[in-house]
Amino acid sequence: MSLEDSSKSRSDYIEKTELGELTTEIPGNALSESHKTYLLQRHGTLDLDPVPSMDPADPYNWPLYKKIFNLILVAFHACMGTFTAAAVIPAYEAIATDLGVSMQRASYLTSLQIAILGGAPLFWKPLSQRYGRRPIFLLSLILSCVCNIGCAKSPDYASMAACRALVSFFISPAMAIGSAVVTETFFKRERAQYMGIWAVMVTLGVPIGPLIFGFVTQRVGYEWIYWTLAITNAVQFILYVFFGPETRYIGTDIHAASAFKREYLSIRRIDPAPLQLAEFYHPLTLVTNIPVLIASAAYAMVFLFASVMNSVEVPQLLQAKFELNAEQLGLQFLGLIIGSLLGEQLGGVLSDTWMNVRAKRTGHKPEPEYRLWLSYIGYLLTIAGVVVFLVCTQNAPTGRWVVSPIIGTGIAAFGNQVVTTVMITYAVDSYPADAGSVGVFINFIRSTWGFIGPFWLPDMFDTVGIAKSSGVVTALLMGVSFIPTVILQLRGRKWRAVDIQTLTPHQPSFPNFTGIIPQSSNTHVNTFTTPDSVTPSSTPNSTERIHDSAPKHILHINFLLCHETFSTIKLVRNAAEFETRIQSRGVLASNSPMTSIFVGKCSGTHSITSHASLTAGVMSVELKGWIWPTGREIRGKVV
């Protein structure tokens, strides 16, 4: 069946762009009556993207208050990563004096944590895919609490640095997995707003830490920084136990256990797919995904100068010049806090409004690149703020505090937050199939830049001069952020372009595959076109085996159950994906989504076998997969 032969109702699944890209959308008439009734009762509308299942444990079906409270827990957890790293900034001088090290070495206690915060999520992300987000978050907090106690009891610099490194390793999951939690919980129309809450908390951790702990250092000593962090981690752990449900919805065991048990009490392996070494470095392969790479690099450069430089370098730039104590030093971070909060209003709420207005005007969803128009405001404000901060810092009289540098940091923070929300949301929208990996990759790039910066920024100030350094900063922001974003806006759709071909059960037309060969039961495969023969008591396993003629490729197949017979295949040239299981989002026409998916490695004549259980009412099965590392997305339906 060709795409041209499909009926009008079938065409409702897709949105055509100038480049011929097709994206699957689910019309209301593709849902069963019971499914429609459930969605209307739960959400009051069928205009939902993604379309939830009929399971109350599905995070998309949670009441709004439950979603928001869980987001607050995750966002605050993410904040604790940068908050913990920056907490010792006002205590550099006290730590240096107490441990007998230079102030520069004391600052490495922050740089060390920034570096580990970038790499550690590579370890946590695959585990959260198998065991869920909730167990990882609980483990993260209890171990962070223990290690913060170790920091408080450290007798020397080496032991404190070691404990700080462990804290950053254990506190890091929410900084990267948070984007996946937002994607798993909120619909697309509201995603930027809630993604912005998570993103702004990551940003706010940097200035809030010094603001609070400047008073702690001055009043009771820097050791209480660590005791306070340990107590906070313990409180977070308790809140997660009672109010932090599982957001990684698999859709298995729907009838075997209550929704409450699956959300709160089921700490076990929820995804049976085998854990493979490639998953631990897979997010780094997104370096081949040009839209995600440009968005990450552009954001990371802005974050370096608007957040890291304007916080980590403040003690060396302002404390000595204005003769500030720890409390006064902490107050210098108010500009960053105010600017970030105000910037989030433009980057988050107005960003969603911007996209929704465009959708109403054109009658279809705008391309992700349309969101990038808002990023230019952020870039220009960041440049202006950094220039004000550096020039006013150099020109300020020694020994007499002036507010102008803080105004500069506030302007830069405003711009940084706009860029943060816009670019992260764009990256996730460009590659929504694996929002977790996108978050890990962005965090890695951001933290790597943030770690390197404090090593060369002081030398730049000494060599070039504080005021003249603003020229270097401006050049880097234009060259790495502004100009690449312009190019991305012009060519992003082409980089995400797809080839549409027709797929039949036994005659696939895409390259590198020799066929879809039904294994174990041909009659079961044939029931795809005879839904009346599929009954609740007749739910055998369907096994499709796909042979890859190209060696060393990894393929993942995802089954989505739907009512409409629609045969097409989609190839995305620039996607870089290896995921052992992608959640079943789309049409779940039956009362029960798929039970399990297994994936394997495909090399030469070896094959991958995927299993899915069918339930009553199924008329077709959509295949959805990605080949890594060549980066082609494959979608098709066996009909």
Image: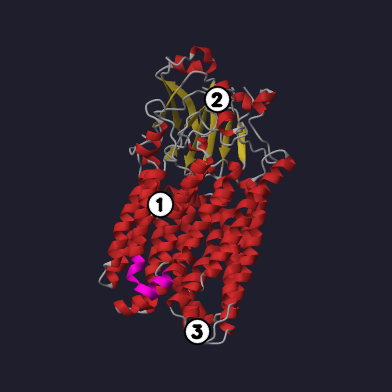
Which image quadrant: the N terminus? top right
Front label number (3 vs 1): 3
Residue at 61% over, 56% down: 345
Residue at 60% over, 28% down: 502
In the picture as drawn, the residue positioned furthest to the bottom comes out as 398
Q: Quadrant of residue 601?
A: top left
Left/right placement of residue 27 relative to residue 539 reads right
Mark 3–mark 1 distance (CA, rounded to whole Å): 38 Å
In the picture as drawn, the residue positioned furthest to the front comes out as 219
Q: Find numbered disc 2 in the image and state the secondary structure of the residue it sits on.
A: helix
Q: Tell me if residue 337 can be seen.
A: yes
Magenta run includes residue 214? yes
Q: Find numbered disc 1 in the image and state the secondary structure of the residue it sits on.
A: helix
Please name the residue that numbered disc 3 is placed on: 321
Question: Is 381 above or below relative to 36?
Answer: below
Q: Quadrant of residue 487?
A: bottom right
Please name the residue that numbered disc 2 is placed on: 35
Residue 173's mark?
1
